[in-house]
Image: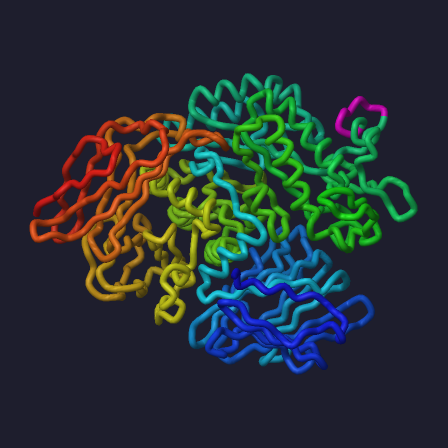
């Protein structure tokens, strides 16, 4: 029985005493409605406080006990400390330009947290309420968690562990898993606000290839449009978008274009998105029934009513011409929604939305209820529209605002960050927290959107970014250029080397991505996700994370500092990724160097990699490489498909190894799937006291290879 308990407001006379499942016990006090959840041994997982619920008009507050030593994680890309204890937060999607570590609320509302106990174990709590809500984790009362909202139902889910991984997987079962993105989305992506002409885009593409910087994507920000109007192009600076897409496509690039949701209020001007939207009654209205019009980038604008299925379908149809022109993906920005010239930065709470989809009863709702899901429904409309236009191609959509479950429709990023060392640290925290909150695919603008980074900061950010889910460089138009070559040959060489390493690791990263799509596991994870004891490791792990379960990245917790620092490893016998050397002990000391990012490999890992390519559109030339790091539970996974199709053939093969008296026995499992791989042979390198490399024919079926030495 899934260890998920859903708790709703019920009349006292209907409350039951409790029940047991195969995993836990649930008790409800008939008089007070106090809820407690225990394991089968009677140990408390979660318990209400003495006064479990309080009401103030339509507002409610729930109180849960906060035991000593309990740690709190999640809530999406909130700032503050990674452990949320002693902090409080508000969920109200906000355009947080120039945010800092103390900024709250921020772009997304993901009302889900994970708690881990002092003695081990974990649970999650998801408040399924779209109104403005709040979470207080011992900030006001050190012994209590307080959860509330301005209105709406008391509707929440308790997800029992016992591990953090169990909680995250069950939460993904509940709210949806992030689908496997197209392979090209795993490559390096170059952006700026803005590349101002098609000629500049071509020059960026040419420079990336000239400098031998592997890359897959170039982004178009709002200046490719006519007067910032979505679904238009500036016919002077971008006269032929289809030809541009084809030209850069020949070099292995895809284009991703921004399409903000604010449609220019342009009656009688021949602007098709406004005309068709108005004709279909697709825009939100004021309480008096008049059209809601407010200023954003195009000037006076109107806003789609995405809670209507018909409006989402209309919005999706607007991508027809761009899809036909070969634009590969789309970017939904400003969808909190952001509004200019207003103190709240968004719509008034009285604006009206019509709910007409998903088997809900038809009704009108205020923006106070819809605000936090508005950005998610925008990205949903884009995703579903692309799926209808290109039925067997994986949609690629990036969104700034979202809600719990939004990972089904779009990847995300942390918004308009700053070029500071603290924001580099904050970006790592935010992406880890997003992963724990369902968003396996996230990124942060490299090397910070505002301000301009020093060459050293930019280089360090490129290095770390090479091991994060979405690897995109993006900066504001009033900042110094931030392309890989911007700071000279020395920095270009380092940045290029780390970008190249990501492309060599593409088979490993793609296998991690596919596993994430099946299980809900994050791609980028806190070290304690797969190694629970690391939660209490003595080293500062604020810049440490794993990519999948087998690679541990450990940047300096004080990245601006030249002084040495300690790295804690989950166990003895881990390997240095760069040298292949096996390490003794569970702690290593690192001396910061600009050209080195410490990366370590799990003993027992088998890491697949490939020859270097300049984009994922290029077929690797040479053997598939398997780096074997002997140890317990020695295993690896090979996964391959065409990189773009939703339904199509694939290839999956497990590889395991065992130590023998003569050396090592490497076993290739039965190959599942009919997809033909690009490699004809496999190069195997066994790491240890000395590296041993051999090349063998491809292993299409179950086979064992004995490696002596």
Does residue 564 show up?
no
Q: Is residue 269 magenta?
A: yes
Q: Which image quadrant is residue 259 in?
A: top right
Of all residues shown, which one is farthest toward the right? 288
**Is 532 placed above or below 515 here?**
below
Q: Is residue 616 magenta?
A: no
For the point 48% across and 24% down, the residue is 203
Residue 400 in the image: x percent, y percent? 61, 46
Residue placed most toward the observer, 86 or 706: 706
Horizontally, residue 220 falls left or right of residue 120, namely right
Residue 24 in the image: x percent, y percent? 52, 70
Residue 483 in the image: x percent, y percent? 45, 37
Horizontally, residue 535 falls left or right of residue 695, namely right
**Is 337 placed above or below 212 here?**
below
Residue placed most toward the observer, 443 or 72: 72
For the point 67% across and 46% down, the residue is 375
Does residue 524 show up?
yes
Horizontally, residue 183 falls left or right of residue 332, namely left
Range shown magenta: 268-274
**Is 387 placed above or below 443 here?**
above
């Amino acid at each position: 029985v899934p260890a998920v308990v859903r708790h709703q407001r019920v009349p006292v006379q209907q409350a039951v005493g409790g029940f047991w499942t195969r995993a836990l016990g649930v008790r409800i006090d008939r008089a007070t409605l106090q809820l407690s959840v225990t394991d089968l041994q009677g140990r408390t997982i979660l318990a209400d406080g003495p006064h479990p619920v309080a009401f103030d008009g339509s507002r409610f507050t729930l109180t849960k006990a906060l035991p000593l030593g309990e740690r709190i994680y999640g809530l999406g890309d909130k700032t503050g400390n990674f452990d949320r204890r002693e902090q409080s937060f508000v969920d109200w999607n906000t355009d947080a330009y120039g945010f800092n570590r103390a900024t709250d609320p921020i772009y997304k509302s993901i009302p889900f947290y994970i708690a881990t106990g002092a003695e081990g174990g974990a649970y999650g709590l998801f408040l399924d309420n779209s109104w403005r809500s709040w979470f207080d984790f011992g900030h006001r009362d050190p012994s209590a968690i307080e959860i509330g909202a301005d209105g709406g139902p008391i509707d929440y889910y308790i997800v029992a562990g016992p591990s953090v991984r169990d909680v995250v997987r069950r939460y993904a079962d509940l709210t949806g898993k992030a689908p496997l993105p197209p392979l090209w989305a795993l490559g390096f992506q170059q952006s700026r606000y803005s590349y101002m002409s098609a000629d500049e885009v071509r020059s960026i593409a040419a420079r990336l290839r000239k400098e031998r910087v592997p890359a897959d994507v170039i982004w178009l920000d709002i200046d490719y449009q006519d007067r910032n109007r979505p679904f238009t192009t500036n016919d002077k600076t971008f006269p032929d978008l289809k030809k541009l897409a084809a030209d850069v496509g020949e070099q292995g690039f895809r284009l991703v274009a921004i399409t903000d949701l604010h449609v220019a209020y342009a009656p009688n001007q021949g602007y098709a998105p406004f005309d068709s939207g108005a004709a279909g009654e697709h825009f939100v209205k004021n309480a008096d029934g008049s059209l809601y019009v407010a200023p954003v980038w195009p000037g006076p604008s109107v806003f789609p009513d995405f809670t209507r299925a018909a409006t989402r379908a209309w919005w999706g149809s607007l991508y027809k011409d761009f899809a036909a022109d070969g634009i590969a993906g789309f970017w939904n920005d400003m969808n909190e929604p952001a509004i200019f010239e207003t103190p709240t930065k968004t719509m008034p709470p009285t604006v009206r939305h019509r709910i007409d989809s998903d088997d809900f009863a038809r009704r009108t709702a205020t923006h106070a209820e819809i605000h936090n899901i508005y950005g998610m429904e925008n990205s949903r409309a884009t995703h579903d529209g692309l799926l209808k236009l290109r039925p067997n191609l994986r949609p690629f959509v990036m969104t700034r605002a979202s809600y719990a479950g939004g990972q089904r429709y779009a990847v995300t990023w942390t918004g308009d960050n700053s070029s500071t060392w603290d924001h580099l640290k904050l970006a790592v925290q935010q992406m880890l927290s997003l992963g724990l909150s369902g968003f396996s695919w996230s990124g942060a603008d490299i090397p910070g959107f505002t301000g301009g980074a020093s060459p050293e900061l930019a280089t360090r950010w490129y290095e770390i970014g090479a091991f994060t889910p979405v690897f995109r460089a993006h900066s504001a138009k009033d900042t110094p250029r931030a392309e890989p070559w911007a700071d000279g040959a020395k920095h270009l060489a380092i940045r290029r080397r780390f970008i190249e390493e990501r492309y060599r690791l593409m088979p490993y990263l793609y296998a991690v991505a596919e596993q994430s799509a099946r299980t809900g596991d994050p791609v980028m994870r806190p070290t304690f996700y797969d190694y629970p004891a690391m939660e209490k490791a003595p080293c500062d792990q604020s810049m440490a994370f794993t990519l999948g379960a087998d690679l541990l990245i450990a940047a300096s917790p004080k990245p601006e500092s030249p002084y040495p620092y300690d790295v804690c490893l989950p166990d003895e016998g881990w390997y240095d990724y760069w040298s292949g050397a096996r390490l003794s002990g569970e702690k290593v000391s690192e001396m910061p160097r600009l050209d080195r990012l410490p990366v370590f490999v799990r003993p027992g890992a088998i890491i697949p990699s490939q020859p270097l390519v300049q984009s994922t559109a290029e077929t690797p030339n040479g053997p598939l490489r398997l780096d074997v790091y002997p140890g317990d539970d020695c295993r690896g996974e090979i996964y391959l498909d065409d990189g773009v199709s939703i339904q199509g053939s694939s290839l999956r093969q497990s590889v395991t190894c065992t130590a023998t008296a003569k050396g090592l026995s490497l076993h290739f499992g039965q190959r599942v799937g009919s997809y033909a791989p690009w490699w004809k042979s496999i190069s195997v390198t066994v790491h240890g006291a000395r590296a041993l490399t051999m090349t063998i024919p491809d292993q299409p079926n179950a086979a064992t290879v004995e490696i002596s030495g």
